[in-house]
Image (cartoon, helix red, strand yellow):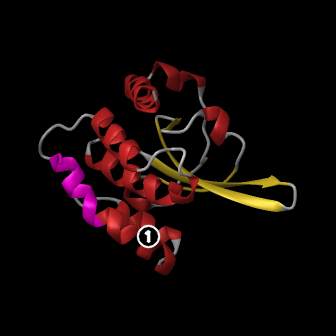
Amino acid sequence: MTALRLRMVPWAYALPVLKKLLPLPVLARLAWPRRRSRRPVAVETVLTTVLRLWPVRSRQNCLERSLLLYRYLSWAGAEPMLATGLRREGERLHGHAWVSVAGRPVGDSIDEVSTYTPLVAFGPRGVPAGDPAPWHQDARADPIAVALLSAARRVRG
């Protein structure tokens, strides 16, 4: 097991309980790390590790997966945004949580995330942020966004 996975294990076990006890704004602030990594950590490594532990197909854990991505992408030096949204399917409402970096979803496709009406987003230090779904075309040129999208495609196979 890698050092990064070992760092994630306590959070992975705590999040299922914490998400039932704490409101989302408190979880977002708690998830933001106090310090960044002292050694360089590739954001692709963080994404790959989290997606292997919590596959995108596993919708029931999207909040846990997103909180881990939010925490460890920020720890690695990226500036992630944690967002939530709802979509209606007939009489039912479905919620989803996702993370974006440089205006692009990480680990989710824009097509999937755009089916949700954004509710709230959290930026640095878990502070509520502006637009939770800034699908800017110029994000495609951002090197971090391009690397994250590439890593996500490799993990999904």
112 left or right, relative to 71? right
| Magenta stretch: dominant secondary structure | helix
Front residue of this view, candidates 112 and 155? 155
Front residue of this view, candidates 139 and 57? 57
Q: Quadrant of residue 108?
A: top right
Q: State the extent of the magenta-drawn residues as a range.
A: 1-10
Q: Quadrant of residue 137?
A: top right
Residue at the right extreme? 90
Q: Is residue 7 magenta?
A: yes
The residue at the point 48 percent across, 72 percent down is 19
Q: Is residue 54 magenta?
A: no
The residue at the point 32 percent across, 33 percent down is 44
Residue at the bottom extreme? 21
- Residue 99 image position (x, y, % from top left): 49, 46
Specify the amino acid type for callout 1: Pro
- Residue 138 image position (x, y, % from top left): 54, 22
Quarter of the picture containing the C terminus is top left
11 left or right, relative to 57? left
Front residue of this view, candidates 86 and 61? 61
Secondary element under disc 1, as helix, strand or loop, is helix
Q: Give the answer, above or below, for where 150 lies relative to 32.
A: above
- Residue 156 image position (x, y, % from top left): 46, 32
The residue at the point 58 percent across, 34 percent down is 109
68 left or right, relative to 117? left
Count of numbered marks: 1
Q: Quadrant of residue 57?
A: top right
Residue at the top extreme? 141
9 left or right, relative to 119? left
- Residue 107 image position (x, y, % from top left): 48, 39
Q: Which residue is mark 1?
A: 16
How many other residues sit within 10 Å of disc 1, few (<14), some (14-19) or many (≥20)? few
Q: Give the answer, above or below, for where 138 lies relative to 2.
A: above
